[in-house]
Image (cartoon, helix red, strand yellow):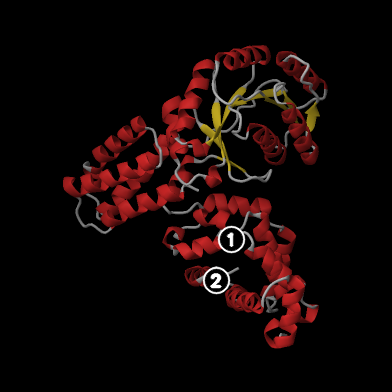
Amino acid sequence: MFDNLSERLNKSLKKIRGQGRLTEANIKETLREVRMALLEADVALPVVRDFIDRVKERALGQEVQTSLSPGQALIKIVQSELVKVMGEANEGLNLATNPPAVILMAGLQGSGKTTTVAKLARWLKENEKKKVGVVSADVYRPAAIEQLKTLADDLSIEFFASDVSQNPIDIARQAVADAGKRFLDVLIIDTAGRLHIDDEMMGEIKQLHAAVDPIETLFVVDSMTGQDAANTAKAFHDALPLSGVILTKADGDARGGAALSIRHVTGKPIKFMGVGEKMDALELFHPDRIASRILGMGDMLSLIEEVERKTDKKKAEKLARKLTKGKAFDLDDLRDQLQQMINMGGIGSMMDKIPGMANVPQNVRDQANNNKAIPQQIAIINSMTPQERRAPITVLNGSRKRRIAQGSGTTIQDINRLLKQFKQMQKVMKKFKKGNMANMMRGMQGNFRGGMPF
């Protein structure tokens, strides 16, 4: 996420990081490169101008000039200003009203609005323990109603039926009334999207808004459209009292222009961001954490929260007990870890959250983003006998490897690669057995430098 911007900014700031003294000349050169990095990231020009002016003013001030490490002080200023541009802190949903709290979702066609309705419903159900219902008022795209119904059924979310022959305002009013009768906490209304902004669309959504008086009106926008996303959000904000924005497809956005422009252009906070296709791939938008990721500092808080949500705690506790008793880490354990990794979206999805990953070689990062590697390794382990999984290093010979390769559709080289990585993980787990978490983390960091541990 935001890889291009992160790489450019890190390259620009690296030159000044070790400077013992900052002058107007070297600050000017660094900020010129930062300015180019932001413009190439498709950040809106007014945002870039204000950002550079504020950083320059602070960089030439006392907080840097009197610092023992001026280069680090400048980086801290850049991080601080990135946070300000994106909105200081996460602003959650306001659901403080008589239930059902109505959330109206608006956006252009193709922004991922209907999928985001389902993701948000799931997030509210799982994280806020709310009883949630959804309804589609998009009578112009029949597939939208069926799509939302399918997603709601999969997630066990209340779905209110609608039909293309109905009026969108009637659909919304009826859904609000029915949600009240079913004692739901939240009702999310999916509205019609268009390929572009037009008067008819805006007129209809204004009427819809007036009819249901939502407590939250969220604009859903594709982050990969860059500063166009901010301009579109502004057009909607001029027509509707938006309360916030949801950025979709942030995992595929290498630039970050939308994330850095929307708050400045609209004055409205980004509340959530979509980071994948799965229904659980919706995260709260924390400006401070995103700024840290952009500057290659990682985001351990989000990573820990993700691990808490998505890992199988019983299996994790079982492995911890096994290791503390001095038992060996085997391929069954590795398979469990690999499966957990798939549940979390693979190592590639976590790399920008791990501090120092900006310094990992590109070929290692590319390897991490190889979505086929982990399922392939699981297939290899599944093709082994229980004895082979318990003691692969001593048991596996040439004929056994040929049988496993045939059974898993892989090669002997793939098996040898897995065994090499398994040995590395065994070493790391031995350090955990001794209770030395610091040594374990150092071991994992060493594995990242030489290649992925999985």
Q: Nearer the viewer, residue 303 or 383?
A: 383
Q: What amino acid type should be assigned to the residue bearing mark 2? A: Met
Disc 2, SS: helix
Picture residue at 55% right of the left edge, 62% below the top: 368
Would residue 401 be seen by someone viewing this image from the given angle? yes
Name the residue that disc number 1 marks: 370
Q: Is residue 66 left or right of residue 1?
A: left
Q: Quadrant of residue 327?
A: bottom right
Q: Which one is closest to the eye, mark 1 or mark 2?
A: 1
Disc 1, SS: loop
Q: Nearer the viewer, residue 450 or 375?
A: 375
Picture residue at 31% right of the left edge, 51% below the top: 12
Q: Are marks 1 and 2 in contact (CB under 8 Å)?
A: no
Give residue 443's position: percent from left, percent from top.
52, 72
Would residue 267 be seen by someone viewing this image from the given angle? no
Name the residue that disc number 2 marks: 440
Give residue 286's position: percent from left, percent from top.
51, 41
Q: What amino acid type should be assigned to the residue bearing mark 1? A: Asn
